[in-house]
Amino acid sequence: MPRSLTSLPPAQVENTPEFDIAEAEDFVRQHHAEHPDLGPVEARLAEVHAEIAATGTYRHTTAELTFGARVAWRNSSRCIGRLYWRSLKVRDLRETSTPADVAAECVEHLRLATNGGKIRPVITIFAPAEPGMPAPSILNEQIVRYAAYRGPDGGVLGDARNLALTELALKRGWQPPASRGPFDVLPLMVTCEGEEPALVEIPSDAVLEVPLSHPDLPWLAALGVKWHAVPAISNMRLRIGGIDYPSAPFNGWYMGTEIGARNLADHDRYDLLPYLAKRMGLDMSSEATLWRDRALIELNRAVLHSFGEAGVTITDHHTESRRFLTHLEKEEAAGRPCPADWSWIVPPVSGGLTPVYHRYYDSGDLLPNFFPAGKPSGCPVAH
């Protein structure tokens, strides 16, 4: 049997950074259990123990990295789209750590994921956090983020969520368009201790955007509202078998409500509902007229209609809710738990009309998984 860290000579224990060997063992055993063709697990466990004893960490095989990334998506309790976890394309870029190279590969990630509008789930995994080896960090919450500019009257032009990120980009030398607009794409900002930080403009031909129109409200197309096609989350920490990958941007495709009921509707984002309600001629004299609800439904119709017209992959909340329960059934049939955060799984529009509303779910976080950068491993991912 492989030795544990506590069985090493005292000198070796003192010189070995803390490492959760049990977590590494659990992952290796899980990988072999779900892939019986790999054969007995003992030989691989011995390799992992020896490498940790010698270096304080170990290196995943390409197969382990691929499996770990896919299972991390499978375990993400706040994600409703996990039915597709096996289709995740894993880009192994662990040798890439300089900020400029990381930024360049994030642009390539966008191109691969966009796929002409037929969005592909992709993850790009950069250098891990290793003893004495700083790992790159992507400051953007998603690869594509829209800038926000505060006006002299205190109002905000753009995505108010990104005020701090925009200010940082400006301080680092970013030159926004001469005519600032509500959908200016921010540059990618990547840092790594001991390296020059990178601030890289994302080429316009790498960012597929969908202009919004509406099947029954022709004036909506003239507003210039749009959204980008690929939701590539870039500031999460991927943890696999005790190893952290601080930079591992990943994407699925949008569910319409993410754009229509949150990004464009939230009061601290674009806050479009009051304007749309006025243009629709709705009675806004009282909340009881449900003007917000009526405007929200039409905004979400516009999102689904526009992505459909543009040939860009998107899904609606009713369809995705049914697909999630299919995923849940598959996981239960495989004898695996399927944690889900009810408050995130239930859509922000017509939640009670979807099948995911009417049941309870297992709680807790499984590993591998995604976590907020710099937070303990028990913190859940935000999608």
Image: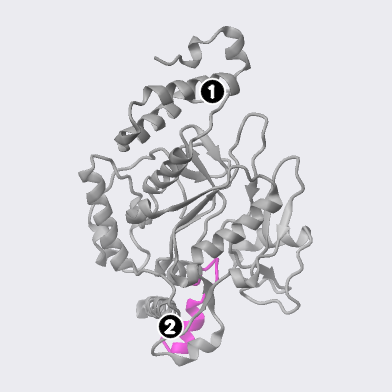
Relative side of 156 to 295, left or right: right
Asked if residue 55 is among those painted magenta in the image, a careful observer would answer no
Q: Decide which of 343, 60 is in the foreground and name it.
A: 60
Q: Give the residue furthest to the left.
A: 333
Inspect the image, locate mark 2, and give the three-letter code of the amino acid beneath it: Ser
Q: Which residue is mark 1?
A: 52
Highlighted magenta segment, given as a residue range: 264-284
Asked whether the viewer can see residue 157, the reply is no
Q: Which mark is residue 285?
A: 2
198 over 308 or under it: above or below:
above
Residue 180 drawn at (x, y percent): 70, 76
Residue at screen point 51% across, 19% down: 50
Relative side of 364 to 116, left or right: left
**Mark 1–mark 2 distance (CA, rounded to whole Å):** 66 Å
Inspect the image, locate mark 1, and give the three-letter code of the amino acid beneath it: Ile
Q: State the SS at label 1.
A: helix
